[in-house]
Amino acid sequence: MQNSQQDALEVELIRSLFEAVSPVIIMSVGFVAAGGLMAWETRDPILALLLVAGAVTSIVRLIIMTSDRPEALRGELTIERARFLQRRFTYSYFGFASVLGMFGCQALQLPFPKVHMLMICMVVGYAAGVAANIFLRPRIALPSMLVAVVPALTAALAQPDVVYWATSMLASAFLAGGINSVRARYARAAKSISRRLAFSTLARQDGLTALPNRLALREWFAERVTDAAKPGMIAVHFLDLNGFKPVNDRFGHPTGDALLVAVSERIVRTIRPVDTAARLGGDEFAVLQCDIANADEAALMAKRLVSAIGAPYRIDQHTIEISTAVGYIVAEHGAEDLECLLSLADEALYASKRTGKGVTRWDPGLVDPERAAA
């Protein structure tokens, strides 16, 4: 559970890298414009080469930002994929920062005071932009600020002029303040995001089994089925435990709770990673299969659930045997809403219990007149 929460926090922090494209555009345009002016003013070939390198890295940064941004901001993003996107972002970000640092060092070694003034303004502005926009990833922000700013400040300090020394010292103080600000803001923001994610998880998670609850199930269905361009064929399984109340009566509620946890673990091990399971309340569970090839896959899943749950349990020195009944429905292209599908799967579950079959697929002939009247 702890690792899951840490992964969710890391994903959210990585998302923040891709939230704002405009600062990257502004810095890229500013570098090309100001760098071009400095290269023209000095006629220095090294500055010209660094200007080209900076323009290339800026273009790469923009391409990565615009191409990876939709995926990064999507609701469903695994920790592995998030880290891959972060690596791509980091390489391009460090690339530009390195070029900017070399450009600043070279510019401040040339005998052009106006160029020096413009260059100091550029690197300080870059550091301020980094501190403002990517402070949630200090492992990227802090090295980028240092690589971009320190070479220019070192070159200024090497000038035989007290004004340059004062400028370098003052800019260094600003840089140190920016670094402290990044660290402090990151600590506060990470704590706030972590708290928000924890509350969000609690609101969508069953408190006993840690399975998704009905709210989380609805959100999963909306994302994978309702809002999907091609949801494909889906199956909804509704199941409960036969004889669960006698377990509570005989062994006590703590053992009954432990049994529910064990059942939920078996359900999770039985379904595919692309499917989901939820506890709806009491001893009732739901399983959603998405993008299945045919109805036989749903029937096979229902039988596997019955088999997995029906194996004996060893809980608190007790051997407990319990069975389940499953009702399921198969729908084409997610045509029905979730509540309707759950209701029909529940009808199939009731029929399964009534007939003793164990597994029943819903069809219109299953409706029980007595239950419908009730």
Image: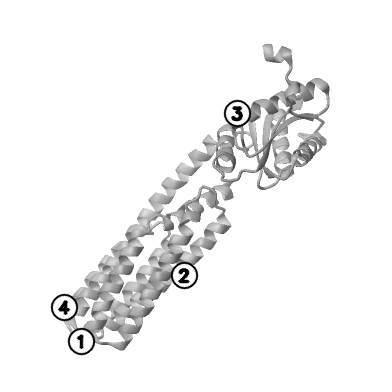
* Whole-number angstrom distance, CA of label 3 to CA of label 2: 46 Å
Q: Is residue 239 above or below residue 22?
A: above
Residue 70 appears at what percent x and percent y? 47, 54
Residue 94 appears at what percent x and percent y? 42, 71
The residue tagged 4 is 163
* Whole-number angstrom distance, CA of label 2 to CA of label 1: 33 Å
Q: Residue at x 45, y 42 (%)?
A: 196
Q: Residue at x 46, y 54 (%)?
A: 15
Q: What kind of residue is marked 3?
A: Glu
- Badges 1 and 3: C-beta atoms under 8 Å apart? no
Foreground disc of the pair 1, 3: 3
Secondary structure found at label 4: helix
Q: What kind of residue is marked 1?
A: Pro
Left or right? Give the position of 263 relative to 73.
right
Left or right? Give the position of 308 relative to 144.
right
- Badges 2 and 1: C-beta atoms under 8 Å apart? no
Q: Residue 91: give its label.
A: 2
Q: Residue 339: give its label.
A: 3
In the rendered view of the protein, which quadrant contains the N terminus?
Answer: top right
Left or right? Give the position of 206 relative to 294.
left
The residue tagged 1 is 111
Choose between 331 and 71: the one closer to the eye: 331
